[in-house]
Image (cartoon, rainbow, N blue to C red):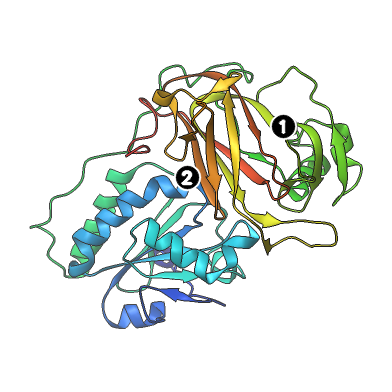
């Protein structure tokens, strides 16, 4: 039977079946322990909005404590197939201005070694190689930083000259904690059949696409008809679409934006993961496609400029759109107050590919989103 101390502070497993490294040469946790370092492991993936929201705090901690014994290691465990690509990870690391080490965990080896289940997840490992603190999800940034300082001090590093942060994280918007499911913040909505069929089989939460014909066959091109009325927490389709493992793909080239994906949402912000991949007849997907434009309608009109996410642009006729030229998350809506709306995304391109929608309910909208 393990000693009480071992049970309270278990030894951290090492990094298993890792791939490419960014911002660092490969190292092991044992090597960090030999150097007396404290390690903060952050499990993340670059299209995860919950992960993205934590990155400013990680950048701050790296800047403040890297010279005081802290090594932050971002373990990039991908959610979607395109996130396995090393070049995509490198580009994301540059875009988010991350300077601490990042390692790919494409086979989920390190994820499973830590018995992890969440994006994001943080594990603070002391200079003896023991896990001293864990935090799952967003928030508690002030608490996490105090733990970092405590463990660094235990390891013999002097952090007295470094000002401690006191920000616990953004506050939830007024009205976002409501009793009814219909008016609650919209859950993450997945478009691929792996998640939808899984939800259908598990029968614990309803699947995400609200069309019976979606579930008749995988990898099928189906003509859908918009029912006209929407319920919060679901996706609706109109026109010809192909359901794939991870995404829903526009299955034809059109001229008048007649095919679309629609939803009713509640929140202050809306984001969508899209990709310019080709899924033409006989293609398996993952083939680079041509960049394309997606028109975005909020309540049957263009997204108002004061509610537009940072990826929204406007054409000469005032239509709001995003230009999809890479596989990533696109920021569509950023409102100051919590509330509902109907969103419609449409494109004439046969490469129009949607993976997932995510939502937020922060007071004043997403901090720094449009800067």
Relative depth, front residue between 294 and 9: 294
Quadrant of res 294: top right
Residue 31 lies, in percent from the top left, at 35, 83
Q: Quadrant of residue 346?
A: top right
Q: Foreground mark, 2 or 1?
A: 1
Mark nearer the N terminus (2 vs 1): 2
Q: Is residue 338 above or below residue 201?
A: above
Residue 237 versus residue 124 in the image, above or below: above
Q: CA distance from mark 2 to mark 1?
A: 35 Å
- Residue at 16%, 70% (x, y): give it: 156
Secondary structure of the residue carrying tag 1 is loop
Left or right, 334 with respect to 193, comes to left
Residue under numbered circle 1: 256
Where residue 182 appears, as percent x and y from the top left, is: 64, 18
Q: Which quarter shows the C terminus?
A: top left
Between 24 and 203, the one lying in front of the other is: 24
Q: Residue at x 59, y 26 (%)?
A: 297
Work out whether residue 140 can be spotted: yes
**Does 1 appear above or below 45?**
below
Q: Secondary structure at mark 2?
A: helix
Percent x, y of residue 367: 34, 35
Q: Position of residue 3 (x, y in %)?
A: 44, 68
Residue at 73% across, 48% down: 350
Q: 10 Å neighbourhood of mark 2: few (<14), some, or many (≥20)?
A: some
- Reading the image, the residue beneath label 2 is 50
Q: Nearer the viewer, residue 20 or 310?
A: 310
Does residue 132 appear anywhere in the picture? no
């Amino acid at each position: 039977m393990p000693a009480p101390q071992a049970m309270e502070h278990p030894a951290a497993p090492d990094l298993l079946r890792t791939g490419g490294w960014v911002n660092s040469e490969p190292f092991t946790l044992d090597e960090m322990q030999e150097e007396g370092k404290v390690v903060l492991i952050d499990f993340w993936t670059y299209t995860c909005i919950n992960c993205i929201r934590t990155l400013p705090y990680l950048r701050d901690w790296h800047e403040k404590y890297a010279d005081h014994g802290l090594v932050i290691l971002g373990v990039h465990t991908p959610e979607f197939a395109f996130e396995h690509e090393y070049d995509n990870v490198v580009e994301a690391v540059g875009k988010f201005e991350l300077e601490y080490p990042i390692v790919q965990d494409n086979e989920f080896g390190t994820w499973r070694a830590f018995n992890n289940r969440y994006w994001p997840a943080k594990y603070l490992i002391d200079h003896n190689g023991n896990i001293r603190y864990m935090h799952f999800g967003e928030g508690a940034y002030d608490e996490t930083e105090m733990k970092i300082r405590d463990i660094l001090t235990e390891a013999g590093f002097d952090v007295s000259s470094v000002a401690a942060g006191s920000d616990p994280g953004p506050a939830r918007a007024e009205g976002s904690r409501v009793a009814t499911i219909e008016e609650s913040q919209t859950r993450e909505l997945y478009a691929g059949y792996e998640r939808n069929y899984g939800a259908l089989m598990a029968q614990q939460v309803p699947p995400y696409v609200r069309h019976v014909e979606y579930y008749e066959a995988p990898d099928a091109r189906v003509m859908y008809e918009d029912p006209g009325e929407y319920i919060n927490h679901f996706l609706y389709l109109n026109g010809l679409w192909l359901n794939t493992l991870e995404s829903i793909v526009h299955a034809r080239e059109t001229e008048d934006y007649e095919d679309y994906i629609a939803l009713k949402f509640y929140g202050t912000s809306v984001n969508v993961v899209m990709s310019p991949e080709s899924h033409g007849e006989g293609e398996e997907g993952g083939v680079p496609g041509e960049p394309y434009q997606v028109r975005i309608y909020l309540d049957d009109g263009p997204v108002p400029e004061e509610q537009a996410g940072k990826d929204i642009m406007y054409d000469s006729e005032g239509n709001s759109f995003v230009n999809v030229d890479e596989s990533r998350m696109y920021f569509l809506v950023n409102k100051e107050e919590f509330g509902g709306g109907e969103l419609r995304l449409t494109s004439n391109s046969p490469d129009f590919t949607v993976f997932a929608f995510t939502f937020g309910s922060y007071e004043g909208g997403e901090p720094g989103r449009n800067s």
